[in-house]
Image (spheres, rainbow, N blue to C red):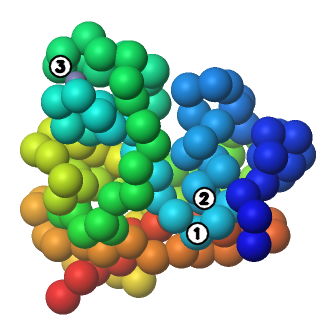
Amino acid sequence: MSEPDDAEVFAHYPDVHIDRDNIAHYRGLMGGRLLINRCSDCGHWIYPHRPLCPACLSWNVVPTEVSGRGSLYMWTLIYQSRDPDTPLYEPILTAAVELAEQPGLRYLSRVVGCPPEALRHDMPLRLTWIEEAGRNWPAFEPAG
Ligand SMILES: [Zn+2]
C-alpha cells in the first residue's frame, strides 16, 4: 500500500486542523504507525508537532515511528464533546502518556482496556489502536 498523498490525508480528517507540521503524523495514523517528530541532528523527540528542534534549534526534523511503550503520566475523564450535535454517551478516558523514547515526551491519547479507578501514575502502557467513526486512532492500554 502506498502512502496516502496530502489530499487523501485532508479528506480523511476533515474535522482535524492539518498543517505542514502535523500532516506526517496523520499520514502515519492512516497507515497504523504512530509518528513523532525527531531531530536528526541531536535525537531530541518533539511533541506537540513542531518543525524546529527546541533542544538545538535545528530544522532537520523527521517524523519517526515510536516503540509504542510508555507510562501513564496523568489522565482525566471528558464528559462533553467538542461538537454539541454529537453528545458523548459515556465519558472518554484521556491521558498524557509519557513515551519511553524520552523523559517528558508526553503524547495525548485515549486509554482503553482499563477502568478509570484502576489507573495509577507511572503504570506501564502500550500502544494499541481503536476504530471510531471509520477511522483508526492510537490509544494506550495497560502493558502488564
Ligand atoms: Zn535537535
Furthest toward the top, the residue is: 57
What residue is at 17 percent from the left and 30 percent from the top? 42
Q: Secondary structure at mark 3?
A: loop
Q: Are marks 2 and 1 in contact (CB under 8 Å)?
A: yes
For disc 3, does the CB lie below 8 Å from ligand 1? yes
| SS assignment at label 2 | helix
User: Is disc 1 surrounded by few (<14), some (14 to 19) or many (20+) residues within 10 Å?
Assistant: some
Find residue 52 and name its label: none
Asked if residue 49 lies left or right of residue 107, the reply is: right
Asked if disc 1 is less than 8 Å from ligand 1, the answer is: no
User: Extreme bottom residue here?
Assistant: 144
Considering the image in quadrants, where does the N terminus appear?
bottom right
Taking the spot 39% from the left edge, 29% from the top edge, the residue there is 61
Q: Is residue 41 above or below residue 115?
A: above
Quadrant (top left/top right/bottom left/bottom right) for the C terminus: bottom left
Instruction: Tell me, yes or no, whether the two marked residues, 3 and 2, touch with CB atoms within 8 Å.
Output: no
**Whole-number angstrom distance, CA of label 2 to CA of label 1:** 5 Å
Residue 76 on image: x %, y %: 36, 51
**Amino acid type, mark 2:** Leu
Where 128 sits versus 24, above or below?
A: below
Query: Residue 93, can we see it?
Result: no
Give x and y (percent) for residue 6.
Answer: 79, 39
Q: Which residue is mark 1?
A: 32
- Judging by the rendered image, the residue that carries numbered circle 2 is 29
Question: In the figure, is residue 42 to the left or right of 91?
Answer: left
Tell me the tag on residue 55. 3
Residue 33 placement (x, y as % from top left): 52, 64
Which is more N-terminal, label 2 or label 3?
2
Instruction: Look at 43% across and 23% down and name the residue there.
Output: 50
* Quadrant where ligand 1 appears: top left
Does the residue tagged 2 have its C-beta within 8 Å of any atom of ligand 1?
no
